[in-house]
Amino acid sequence: MEVVSSGTVMLGRPGTDSQSCAFPQICVLPSGRWICCFRAAPLKGATAGQRSLFVRSNDEGVSWSEPTDAFTPPAVNGKPGLFRALAMTSLGGTRVLAVLYWVDHSQPSLPFFNEATEGLLDSRIFLAWSEDDGDSWSSPELVDTSPFRCPTPITGPVLVLANGELACQFELNKAYDDRSPWHHASVLMYSKDGGHSWPQHALVTSDPENRIFYWDQRPGVLPDGRILDLFWTFDRQQAIYRNIHARESWDRGRTWSQIWDTGVPGQPAPPVPLTDGSIGLVYVDRSGAPQIKMRASKDGGRTWPEESQIVLAQPALASQTREKHRMQDAWAEMADFSLGLPATAIARNGDAVVVYYAGPSTDQTDVKWIRVRAIDPR
């Protein structure tokens, strides 16, 4: 693998409500247009002032439009909200589906995470559709996530499965003031009518001992129809991160293999198929100074040899990890990150496109992109 080009999607704008640009997602449309979505806020930890924006590139990252704020957050049960995250999926032709993560903003002074209870602000999932490559959008529609009534943070874009079904991905948290134990789970919810109803679901991960949290699921649909899902894996008993774990499904997520340890440390992006038949894994390695790296697997994701590794981003940052004794320490550590959360897509020629956020400090970050190509061994 080799990096063939790179650039900046959006510069954080110091002293403005877009100083912190973070948590990007990337979508490549059949027309060749790239759409990059991200969260903009005055500070990384801010709830007030956060918005979900997107920019477009019609020349594969050479230039980008000004950011667009296309979605007005509706009230839910009479409570105002803000959109904290946004991701997009091509539905073929010029049709695009946007999934939005709505968060309660009725009490603007409340932090997103309640350290006393480990609960999150009330949150919901909305969808919107575009028929013109993302130039215009329908009004956001609330998704019925029954039987799940907890806060439901999205973990990435809606997936298009091998049979044309859609799968909405999210994870389960608990209500802000709920003092009962947090039982984390990763979920896929299914639609057969283009996203208008979601009557079926499957639990992807849920540790019965409630010890291992398979955070931030990152599923990818591979060319053979298989779903390979990767997890940022936290052991809450020992308050440490374990290696990235993975599991796969051959029946569109209804049943899953045993979970396995990939041997790779860090926080993953969704896996991407490469033109040489291997699978690419992009991840943040925070075992020392934070770096974004990429490895390749030639055995379906079971192993990811270190000799395949390349470094995609290595900014001059000190270590951003800290000693942890409890869940609250892990959340405090996350809040300090100024490099992270890569997302992936495939360019029209088969190259991998990677987006991530990076900056000199927690509250001053840009959104960057990198293009990676599999090297022909001939």
Image (spheres, rainbow, N blue to C red):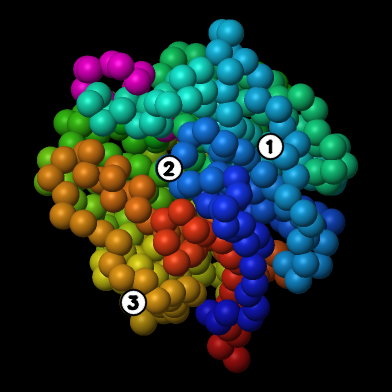
* Image quadrant in which you'd find residue 94: top right
> Which residue is disc 2 drawn over?
45
Residue furthest top in the image? 77
Q: Position of residue 54 (x, y in %)?
A: 70, 47
Q: Estimate the x, y position of residue 369 in percent, counting from the top left.
A: 61, 66
- For the question of whether residue 142 can be seen, the reply is yes
Q: What element carries label 2?
A: loop
The kind of residue on which mark 3 rests is Glu
Dot 3, crowdedness within 10 Å: few (<14), some or many (≥20)? Answer: few
- Mark 2 or mark 1: name the one nearer the start of the chain: 2
Relative height, residue 310 to residue 148 (above, below): below
Q: Which residue is tagged 1?
A: 98
Q: Residue 285, image x and y in percent?
A: 34, 66
The region drawn magenta spans 168-182
Q: Which amino acid does label 1 sit on?
A: Ala
> Residue at 16% of width from left, 55% of height from top?
323
- Residue at image point 63% right, 40% down: 52
3 or 2: tag closer to the N-terminus: 2
Other-residue count near label 1 (Cα within 10 Å), few / some / many at <14 / 14–19 / ≥20 = many
Assess whether mark 3 and mark 1 are in contact (beta carbons under 8 angstroms). Answer: no
Q: Residue furthest front?
A: 15
Q: How crowded is mark 2: few (under 14 residues within 10 Å), some or many (20 or more)?
A: some
Q: Distance between the residues labelled 2 and 1?
A: 24 Å
Tell me what residue is drawn at x 64 percent, y 48 percent: 37
From the image, give the main secondary structure of the stretch colored magenta.
loop
Cα distance between the residues tagged 1 and 3 = 36 Å
Numbered label attached to residue 306? 3
Horizontal side of residue 325 vs 288, given as left or right: left
Residue nearest the viewer, comparing 5 with 362: 362
Q: Is residue 123 visible?
A: no
Q: Which of marks 1 and 3 is nearer the N terminus?
A: 1
